[in-house]
Every structure is written in structure tokens, then in C-alpha cells.
Image (cartoon, grey):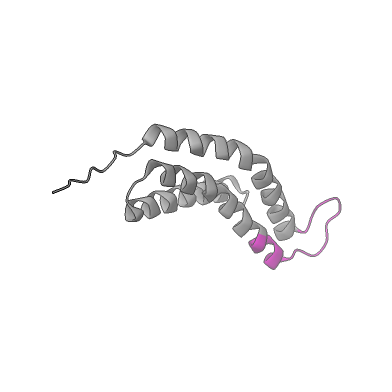
Amino acid sequence: MTTTTVSPPRVGWGVVTAAILLAVVAVPALGALYLAWSGFTGCVLECAQPDVGVGLLWTAVTVGLLAVPGVAGVLVCRVRPRFACAVVGAMTAIVVAFGFAAGLM
């Protein structure tokens, strides 16, 4: 009879992975956020007609880029899939809420 051992979650490695990926994704996410803002307002160098579709597209790209570090960190931690989805969903919702509160999205 063999017993299987389940390795404990590696929270430290998950946090380190998420922090490194956040540093890598920060500049492209800020660029996408700027493009989303310019899509919603229509102003880059001069103001023109705003395009909400472009703004929504770049907002989705920004949220996707900011979700990548959380997803990678949770995958490295080796936690259960339901818990991982809840954590990543909560982190993404927090980022979007801060974006709306700051008027960036």
C-alpha cells in the first residue's frame, strides 16, 4: 500500500513570482491604461471624437495584463483551483475598483 503525500502550498514562491511578473508587466499595463484613457476621452495630443469601443478594448487588455501576475503566483503556490479562481478574481476586482476610484478606467 502506497501513500501519497500532498506538498504544502508554496506561498513564498508564489508571492515572489507575482512580484517579479508585476514588475515586468507594469510598463505595458500603464501603456495600455493610457491607450484606454485616450480611447474614452479622445484626447492624445489633440482632442477628437472619443471611441468607447477602443477604450473598452484597452481596458480589457489592462485588466488581463494585471491579472497575469496573480494567476502565475497562484499556480506556483499549488493551491486548489476553486481557491485560485477566487483569489485571482478578487485581485482583479480590487485592481479594477482602484482604477475606477482613481478615475483611470
- Asked whether 96 or 15 is in front, the reply is 15
Query: How far across and down, in percent of the image, does residue 41 sit?
Result: 73, 57
- Asked whether 13 or 61 is in front, the reply is 13
Relative to residue 21, is residue 59 depicted above or below? below
Q: Residue at x 43, y 42 (%)?
A: 76
Q: Residue at x 39, y 55 (%)?
A: 85
Kindly report the secondary structure that dominates the magenta region of the rendered protein.
loop
Q: Provide the residue span drawn in magenta.
A: 42-57
Q: Residue at x 61, y 49 (%)?
A: 103
Side of 24 relative to 47 (left or right): left
- Asked whether 97 or 61 is in front, the reply is 61
Query: How far across and down, in percent of the image, does residue 8 sit?
Result: 29, 38
Relative to residue 10, is residue 37 depicted above or below? below
Side of 87 relative to 16 (left or right): left
Side of 41 relative to 6 (left or right): right
Relative to residue 31, is residue 14 depicted above or below? above
Q: Residue at x 85, y 50 (%)?
A: 45
